[in-house]
Image: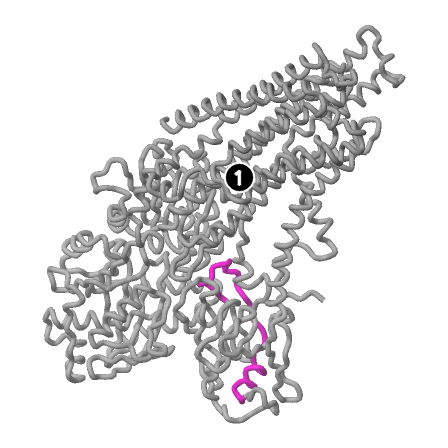
Amino acid sequence: MKKENRIITSKYNKYTFFFVNMYHQLSKPSNLFFLLTMVLLTIPQISPFNPYTYLLAFSLVTGTSMIKDGIEDYKRHKEDKIVNMKIINVAYIEDKMIYSKEIHAEDIKQGDFVILKPEEEIPGDCVLLLSKIKEKCKGYCFVDTSNLDGESNLKKKTSHTVKDCLQNCAESRSDQMSYDFCQCEYDLLENVKNSTVKDTGDVFNKFECTLTTQDREFLCNERNILLRGMKLKNVDSALVYIVAVGGQTKLGKSNVMPRKGTSLFEMELTKIVMIIFVIYFVLLCSTAILGSLFLRKNNLQYLYLGTYLSSDALKLTGTNYIMFSYLIPLSLFVTLEVSRMFHALYISHDENLERDGIKSVCRNSNVTEDLGMIEYILSDKTGTLTKNKMVFKKIHVLGSEEIIDVSELKFNFSNIDEISDLIKFSNVKDEVYRNFFLTFLLLCCNSVEPLNGKLEGISQDEICILQKLEANGIQLLRREEDFLLLKIGNINIKCNIEYILDFSSSRQRMSVIVKFLDKIFMFSKGSDQMMLDEKKINVKILNRESVSKIVNKNSSYRTLICAYREITNEELINLKNDLESVNLEDHEEKEDFFFKKLEKNLEYIGTTFIEDELQDEVKETIEMLKEAGIKIWMITGDKKETALSCAIDSGLMTNLRDNSVISIEGRRVDEELRNPNILSYKSVIIYRSTPKQKSQIALILRNFKKNTLAIGDGNNDVPMLLTSHVGVGILGKEGNQAGISADFAVPDFRSLKYLIFIHGRYNFIRFSKVTLNGLYKNIYLIIIQYLYNFYTGFSGKPVYNNFFLNYYNVLFTSLIPATICCFDKDLPEDYLLRNPREYKSTTSFFCKSVIFLGIIYGIIQGLVVFLLVLGVFFIKDLVRRDGKVAGYNGMNNLMSLIVFFSVFLGQIRLISFYTIYSYVAIFLSLLLLFLTLFVIQDTSLGGNMWILMSIPSAYFTFLFIMLFTYISELCLSKIFYKLVNKKEIN
């Protein structure tokens, strides 16, 4: 039976692992090519040597990747098992008695009644029915949502259903000692029948469902829903009704696996491999054509045992296919893959990327080298460039010409009559407006409530406002679903809550209707863009121009415009009737419509100014990035003035007249960014943008072929992070979804300088060195074999012995590149941080001219070395003391030694930073070569390598050719660094 709530993040099981993983391995074109080569090696008529050594090499390549995948998948299996086998208590009715039983979390179904305990992680999306505190039934509970959004403030959840059944709680309906059920719980289990969930996507703060009981339906939203992954807090227990399990939960829908897409470097590498394939097929086709012509010329088929020339030509083509297959770098892909694992560990354990115990995480090791290729950075503002640590600084109150510093506020009432007079506005003075405004703020911060002596809530703005008010003697003592208990001075006041319409990005405001001292008020607060626009919300302001001027003058602050109006009891009754008629399908639009009727003719009362400080070292980091040639675009949902003020403070622009920077409104992004001239600006400030527009901006830059990194901390930044080449999420107050979805998760913006200038630069140069070396050494190897084919009449005979040929890539010349890929550093870290300009030269190590130079050098060196060795054997073969010549086997072994040592010495010169592993790799490379050629191979070939070593002229030939390769590589190095420096200057 299928278990709908089972979590499966693994890719394989023990029965499918080998077959499915092998399918994935062979889906890579390079591995498929290697498999075809191995199959041809099993055909004796074609293969120039036995297939066992190549089989071992192929097994090393695929086996390494398979072991890595297996280890990673085993970890996922263990994590899945911990979650799925967790014990959950389920309640049910049998013989008119309530019982509970223990089941595994994976066995939970939609429609189950679950009993939650404190600190327990919620196993599915569910509706809160009731909670218990000290054996008394309550209609609310608190949850910790940090697993979902990273926010540390507790959230309150309320129940619709418990209001109808809070009675007879002391009467037990169970004979179980472990948990005492009451009449309320019995009634709920009897009455609740089913639920219908509306698909609202994977957004955590939006949920809609209908809970059906025997006599009515309840419309439930995010206030009544406990999502999978939350933790129950501050109650003794809670009874919930499961409405969604498994992949239908919000967590299941929003799970974003680390991206496994092709990295920028891999795309460049793919282009190079395609060039190599072109060279490969040119060599193969030319050999096949010329070989066939050679067989037909002068009737030379007597040299071959075959009866038909066409058959012989086909066999020779197959043989050459195998010989030239070594042109494709078999081991390079494994070296890069394994080194990425090391790079991910370096990032996770870098102390420079750790803040207050928060460590950085690499979630996608496939893009570690792409950090060295960044041209553009797209940055969010709030929580990324700023701390998202709000400080309530100033207010402007109706009747005042200037803004007031909050620290100067004095708020004292001695009796209830003063507050009553305040509400009636019987004595209108500036102080009266100010006191009313502060009371207004206390009433309209509806997302916050006191809990265990601390203010908890979603909105950082509202928390900082209430904290400042509390310091001035105005305090929120208690918040329930339908009332507030306030303390103003020494006076406690109860205020009834009639309706709340929460803030939304589309409305850009929130409104609350309250009964306060026998009067009914609607209080609204929202963005200045919405509240000061006469066409949208007609807020009555005596001097609108003066208020707008004050807001614009203090644009560096986050502003909230506050307004109110008194409504009649008839208007309230009409609103109640209208809202009761709303159905599930269109309730959001209808609520907005009905509230808009009451929000007309609001009266301005004041404005709050809240400061959001810059992150530590933001300005210094941005200066370094700009010096490195990286262009930074800031994208925010804030208004233009706030965005430009932050840009100036952070160093993105010098002043408002800076012509090198342009500001664009979010709604004009599509038309403005299509113009390629936009790329000429040093920075771009985009304000009033939506999450979708952030993603569009990243996509436009990708279409311009610009390597882009995006950094952000909120759920609204996730589309941008996923669209960019590299996504960096900040583990901040706005949420953790950005950190989960991104390739890298870091604690703050300044971590970018370590991530890009250190890890990015090192990794890209490491990969560049190893890839170019792999390209050169294989072309060098095969060009000699290709030329030898001409010399031997296209016989398909290898110029190297089979042991050397099979292990050349896998063992002999792969160890030093592996240490370079993992440990090499061309310059000290502190020097790179002091000189960000060095980052500009990073991509020069892998530019087209350098790649072309490597290919040409491999071809020329192979040609010269072959001619020199051929000249020695053609003019005068290497002669032993007994008068016998070294012959084919002598040339075979000498060529193997020359090719190895010329490549080996070149690899040593690539090492910039020696570690113990570098010396071990050098020693093992030599040891493996000598063991193979002098011991393993020589045993099978009758001592040919020792015979070669007994010929004095062999040493002279070897040293002369090695001297030539050394001098030529020195010349190549000079040309290489000239190209690098030229590109850096450009």
Rendered location of residue 585, percent (x, y): 48, 63
Where is residue 504, by image quadrant? bottom left
> Neighbour class for label 1 at 10 Å: few (<14), some, many (≥20)?
many
Identify the residue at image location x=46%, y=40%: 825
Question: Viewed as shown, does residue 311 lie left or right of 904?
Answer: right
Q: How is this picture coloured?
A: one colour
In magenta segment, residue 191: yes
Q: Which quarter of the rendered picture does the N terminus lie within?
A: bottom right
Rendered location of residue 755, percent (x, y): 42, 47
Of all residues shown, which one is farthest toward the right?
Answer: 307
**Camera-nearest residue between 377 and 793:** 793
Of all residues shown, which one is farthest toward the top?
Answer: 298
Stretch in magenta: 182-208
Question: Viewed as shown, does residue 449 lie left or right of 764?
Answer: left
Identify the residue at image location x=11%, y=69%: 430
Q: Secondary structure at mark 1?
A: helix
Q: Amino acid at mark 1?
A: Ile
**Camera-nearest residue between 407 and 348:** 348
Residue 683, visible in the rendered structure: yes
Where is residue 544, by image quadrant? bottom left
In magenta segment, residue 217: no
Of all residues shown, which one is farthest toward the front?
Answer: 881
Rendered location of residue 168, percent (x, y): 50, 92
Question: Viewed as shown, does residue 263 lie left or right of 635?
Answer: right
Rendered location of residue 608, percent (x, y): 22, 62
Q: From the image, tell me which residue sits under label 1.
A: 820
Residue 322, visible in the rendered structure: no
Q: Which quarter of the rendered picture does the C terminus lie within?
A: top left
**Camera-nearest residue between 958 and 847:** 958
Where is residue 25, by image quadrant? top right
